[in-house]
Amino acid sequence: GRDGGQGAVEYLGMVAVAGAVVLAIAGTALGTEIDDRIMCQVQRVVGTDGCGGHDTEGAPGPDDPLPPGGDPFQPAKCLLSSEETKDTVVVQILFIKISSTEQVKVMQWSDGSVMLERVTSTGGGVTASIGADIPGLKNWGGGASLGGSYVRSSGSGGRWLFDAHDSDDPQADLEANLADAKQFAEYLKAAHKCRSRPPGARSAELGMICSHAADEKKPDVDPEKAPDVDITKTTTEISGEVSFGGKYAKDDKAVKSLKDDIAAEIRRNNPKASPKELAEKIEKAQETVIGSASDTKDMGNGSLQGLSGTMSKDVVVMRAKTGPDAGKITFVYTFEMSGRSGAGDQTGGTRMQQIAVTYDAEAYDRETEEGLPHRPEKLKITTSEESGGGPGVSVGAGVNTGPVTIDVGGGGGSTETRLHTEIAEITLTDDTDRETVEDWIRGRGDNPAGQGVPSPSSLVGPLPSDAGPIDRLLHGKAQISSLDYDVNTDWWNASLGIGFGVSAGSLNAGFKLFGIDVTHEERTQTITGNPAYAGAPGGDGSRPWKPFTNCSDTEPITT
């Protein structure tokens, strides 16, 4: 509700803030130590409190019991790898943006289970851009432009857990469960295609045939138990980009030749005239004969993206119907900042903070209806930093027909990055602990979430004397782990736009009458290094790092 009622002034201010986002990311090694003041401004624009907590998202795994006789501070499992495909289509009409996204993700866990998640979302927002001619940028076409957009979207989907193969060999279970998950993913894809058939004379009959073919792809699972988790998602995103380019022209040989002939004739007939008199006579004669015709032809425009940055806030609600979390509801909040720069070899980075809180669904609904305080059962905090790069390019070109422009753009690339993730997770069984967590989330008491989310790695050392209740709770009881992943991302983008532009001196401003932009991204994330977890607090107040064997004893299956 806090994002409602955006005013025109705020939307105009969004463009400047988006530019600041890009410059902030570029000036801070693309994703490290982002200036908090930039975050404050962005949060104010999108309608949140500003300068408060970094609300965050994520996908916590099922709340499995600890292994018998194991260290209670070692998590029962970890995420080994994930494969994600994301398709986004954005349509722009004047200053309005309409987006549609489909995201499919397959996750492998070290206990041999596999999760399949599919979420589709649609959204709307505004966009604007401004440009200027810069003489020092001749090699880039003589200009630069700054653009930004604000989009709010909502969506839904489901999550399916595949753990039917459960033996004493997690590696074999992982392979079998992964095969079921991928087969089910193919079934979902085929079923979605059947539902998307256009209406027609034989639509119902062809739909039945299509559905029958899709059903044959389904693995041996109970369709009444799918999905295991219902997902709803709301995303607020603000982005900005800086690109370099400008208008291009070539000489009009016919006009230039005629001008040269007129000048030569004037000089021949006025041998005693001064240079100033000759110049005046030549200009007057040329204007009389050919008017104001230019001696160059407008060839259109071109651009090369230099910097781009995005800030997003996700709110995900997951209701589990079956499986280990049956009857639970989890709220996941994510705040993420990402950026990319470079024209050939591109570098980029992302910082993410995430809070996931789980409640008993029936009790939560009743407490909400009766206005009673909530009793959380689980808290999970995740932070991550990702950086790296690889070959890639984003370019654009266009042709001008008077003030109207037709632009096409596109790009693609492949990046190799390293993702460092830290997780603090605690199951709440004590009423005092539950109240501590709920007060922290709702902004009550000492050190509320609005004053910052603690990094899990900051909780393993001796706590300062002024540490708040949530820090003390997590330090003393939470399972804390540190994981590293290698990430490969392949992407491509294509766009088409019809626009209208006006110029005033060195500034040129324009807007799209219509545009369409399509992006496809495939991301593979695989665990690497030595997973670690923090053991029990020692006498000096620190928690020593130990090998996370529940994570490293199972190898991810790569394809």
Image (spheres, helix red, strand yellow):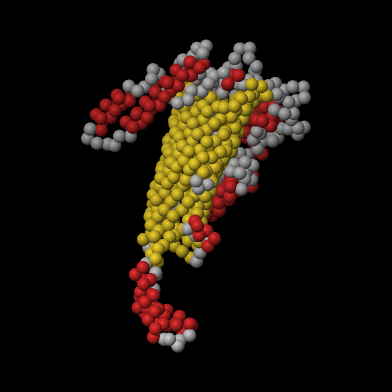
Q: Quadrant of residue 254?
A: bottom left
The residue closer to the viewer here, 296 or 196, is 296
- Establish if 295 lies above or below 519: below
The residue closer to the viewer here, 290 or 55, is 290
Judged left or right of residue 401, residue 16 is: right
Q: Can you give x and y, in whole percent of width and height, for residue 167 in the image?
A: 50, 12
- What is the total number of numbered labels drawn onto the structure image? 0
Q: Quadrant of residue 379?
A: top right
Judged left or right of residue 479, residue 143 is: left
Identified at 72% across, 22% down, the residue is: 537
Identified at 58% across, 21% down, the residue is: 551
The quarter of the picture where the C terminus appears is top left
Q: Can you give x and y, in whole percent of width and height, for residue 234 in the image?
A: 50, 38
Judged left or right of residue 433, residue 111 is: left
Q: Is residue 27 visible?
A: yes
| Farthest-out residue, left | 201
| Farthest-out residue, bottom | 272
Identified at 63% across, 14% down, the residue is: 70
Identified at 49% across, 26% down, the residue is: 107
Q: Quadrant of residue 518?
A: top left
- Establish if 95 lies above or below 290: above
Q: Is residue 238 visible?
A: no
The residue closer to the viewer here, 202 or 375, is 202
Q: Can you give x and y, in whole percent of width and height, for residue 454 in the image?
A: 66, 34
